[in-house]
Image: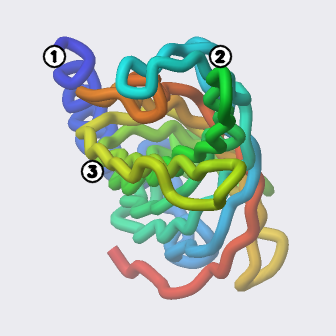
Amino acid sequence: MDRYIFCIAFCLLIIGTALLPTDLHGVEIERQGFAYKNFAGGRFGAWTGMGETRAYDDNLGDSLAFSRSSLYAEFFYAYRIKPPLALEFSMGIFSRGDFKYYSTDNILLGTVNIYPILLSAKFYPLTSVQNLPFFFYLQAGGGIIYGKQVATDYNYGIMFTNDSETKLTYILGGGVDWPVADQIGLCVNYKYIPAKFGKMLSGVRDYSGWQISFGVGYIFGSKGN
């Protein structure tokens, strides 16, 4: 609970700071360029789990092993509120795949797909500095994590289990947005996402971890505030 309170307080601090005047240094930012536009696109990278790499499934009575890392992909849309502040919606996916259930007479192949659906604030602390090619930001927010488990019998190809779980979560992170043309931008994003479910999916409750991803997006719109 304390972590959720901290995250909410951090978001309020970001929003409050962003509502300050944009001419704190005596020079008002020119109302054009990336600091006044929206940004949408896709990011691709790697997810690294922070939990165990072996677990035990009481329902199956078998041990299992899985990979700690996987590919990560997400769509994002950042709506510009003020030059120092954007509100980003993102929806991603990563898979804790290649679960192997070992028993004396059979092998089950399992996959757990995780879908983070998030709303976060992106605070750009250096928008008052002129002519920077990069836009650094801090990020905080929350949303839901949806996990879906499927296990298939290796010998017969039939589905053995199909289960899912949903969890409220928060995120903390940061990154860099880099406009390389009037309407094209590159980006790097890092964030930590807790994902500890109330019940086990393939013998594991805690799918918390961090991701780093690289992306490209479309810069559009204009804020006149």
Say which mark, if any, is on residue 17: none
Residue type, mark 3 in image = Leu
In the picture of the structure, the residue carrying the numbered disc 3 is 19
Give the mark nearer the N terminus: 2 vs 1: 1
* Mark 1 or mark 3, whichever is nearer to me: 1
Q: Can you give x and y, in whole percent of width and height, for residue 39 in the image?
A: 56, 72
Residue occupying the point 52% across, 55% down: 27
Q: Quadrant of the N terminus?
A: top left
Q: Residues within 10 Å of mark 3 (few under 14, many from 20)?
A: few
Camera-side residue of 20 and 42: 42
Residue type, mark 1 in image = Met
Residue 158 seen in the figure = yes
Q: Is residue 94 left or right of residue 1?
A: right
Residue 14's place in the image compared with 4, above or below, is: below
Residue 14, located in which quarter of the rendered image? top left
The total number of labels drawn is: 3
Residue 139's place in the image compared with 194, above or below, is: below
Q: Can you give x and y, in whole percent of width and height, for residue 139 in the image?
A: 46, 40
Q: Is residue 38 left or right of residue 10?
A: right
Secondary structure beneath label 2: loop
Say which mark, if any, is on residue 53: 2
Q: Is residue 200 left or right of residue 202?
A: left
Residue 217's place in the image compared with 92, above or below, is: below
Residue type, mark 2 in image = Thr
Name, please, the residue furthest toward the right.
180
Q: Residues within 10 Å of mark 1 (few under 14, many from 20)?
A: few
